[in-house]
Amino acid sequence: MKFGQYELSLTKGFHKELFKLYFETIQVKVLDKESTAVDDLYGETKSRVYKEPVEIDAFVVRNPPLKLLSKYGIDEQRDLLITFSKPLLEEKKLTVSIGDRVVLKEGDEYEILTFGPDRGDFFGNTGNFIQFVATAKRITENAS
C-alpha cells in the first residue's frame, strides 16, 4: 500500500489531536545561545540563560528512580523518556535540542540529554517523522 501526502497530513492531524487530548502539558525552556556565556578556553557554558518557557503537550514516561550511593549518602537519579509530536513542535515554532530544560507540572526540572526522531515511527521508513524522542535527567537543586 502506498502512502501519499494526503495520508501523511491526515495522520499528522490525528497525531496532533491525540497529543492534545490525552497527554500532559509540560514546559520547555530553550537554551538562549546568544545570551549564554561560554568559556573561551574549554568552550563550556559558564552560566546558562534560558528563554521563556513554552507549554507543549507531550507523552512523558517516568522511569523508576535509581538510587546511587554517593560520598554524602544516597542520591536518587530520575530519568524521563519524552515523546514530542512534530506537528505540535511546528505549530509552536519550537526547536528542542540537547541542553534544553523541561519542567513538569510537579515542578521538577529535567535537562534533555538526547533528542532525535523516533525510528519506530510509522512514517519513519519514508523519512517523514511525525514524532521525536528525548531522554532527560532530573536537575538537582545545586546544579546550574
Image (cartoon, rainbow, N blue to C red):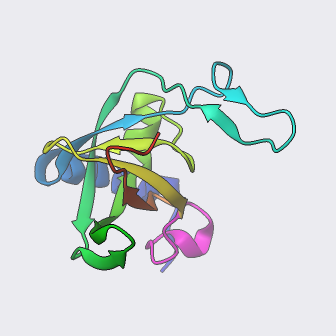
Q: Is residue 99 left or right of residue 60?
A: right
Q: Residue at coordinates 45% horizontally, 71% vertically from top-left?
A: 121
Q: Quadrant of residue 91?
A: top left
Residue 24 percent location from the top left of the image: 16, 49
Q: Main secondary structure of the magenta part?
A: loop
Region rendered in magenta: 117-128
Q: Residue at x 65, y 33 (%)?
A: 46
Magenta span includes 122: yes
* Of 113 and 140, the residue lying toward us: 140
Q: Is residue 65 visible?
A: yes
**Left or right of 90 in this view: 68:** left
Q: Nearer the viewer, residue 18 or 44?
A: 44
Name the residue nearer the viewer: 59 or 71. Answer: 71
Q: Residue at x 20, y 54 (%)?
A: 18
Q: Is residue 97 left or right of residue 21?
A: right
Q: Position of residue 25 (x, y in %)?
A: 20, 42
Looking at the picture, how far across and down is residue 4, in whole percent? 52, 61
The answer to whether residue 132 is magenta is no
Residue 9 appears anywhere in the view: no
